[in-house]
Image (spheres, grey):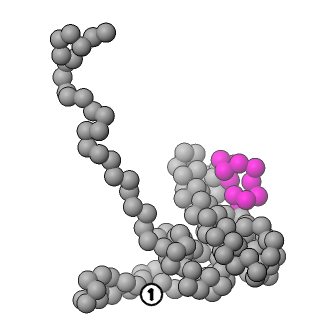
Amino acid sequence: MQVARYYCPTGHATFSLLPDCLASRLSSTLAEVEQVVVVAERAPTVEQAAGQLRPDIEMQGAVRWVRRRLGPVRVALLAIVTLMAPSFGNVAPTIAGLQTALGSGPVLVRLRDVAGIQLRSLPPPLGLGPRSRPRRSRPNAFQHEAGADPPGSRR
């Protein structure tokens, strides 16, 4: 699905209107992401969940694919349950736990309505938080000069 992007000449930035059903920064819907998280929550290990969900690719890629969805969703669920403790009580920050509090149906889509203004600080794919910035490494921080060791440097 194509999401329209618009350019703001005053702010010199682009923006888009993301439909509620789509996951931010992933090429899937929130329902598909939720399905991956549910399978991973029920599986004893992430590797078993990855093998079940993505038998078409190698295990290392499948595990990476599951973790790319599972990790940020776990962080977002924990943040929502913590921030809105009066609304959720002692609900576990899992899809199954929030399903008991919110009823049946797609939990992640409904959490976008519940989170409201907090979506800007929650991580993708549920929230609309900023992209993570890559860590900057200092060039040549621990690198030695190329070539042979200088004379007398052997110990």
Tell me how many marks there are: 1
- Residue 137 part of the magenta-drawn span: no
Q: Main SS type for the magenta part? A: helix
The residue range painted magenta reads: 39-49
Q: Which residue is at a point 58% across and 55% down the rendered structure image?
A: 67
- Residue 45 % position (x, y): 71, 48
Relative height, residue 58 to residue 94 (above, below):
above
- Residue type at mark 1: give it: Leu
Whether residue 141 is visible to the viewer of this picture, yes or no, is yes
Q: In the rendered view, does 43 fall on the left or right side of 46?
A: right
Relative height, residue 31 to residue 9 (above, below):
above
Q: Which residue is at a point 39% across and 61% down the rendered structure image?
A: 133
Picture quadrant where residue 152 is located:
top left
Relative height, residue 45 to residue 13 (above, below):
above
Q: In the rendered view, does 102 fall on the left or right side of 53?
A: right
Q: Nearer the viewer, residue 124 or 38?
A: 124
- Residue 115 % position (x, y): 62, 82
- Residue 62 % position (x, y): 57, 51
- Asked which secondary structure carries label 1, the reply is loop
Residue density around tag 1, few if under 14, some if 14–19, many if 20 or more, within 10 Å: few
Q: Nearer the viewer, residue 94 or 82?
A: 82
- Residue 150 % position (x, y): 18, 16
Q: Nearer the viewer, residue 152 or 73?
A: 152
Q: Which residue is at a point 53% across and 69% down the rendered structure image?
A: 123
Q: Nearer the viewer, residue 87 or 17?
A: 87
Whether residue 27 is visible to the viewer of this picture, yes or no, is no
- Mark 1, residue position: 17
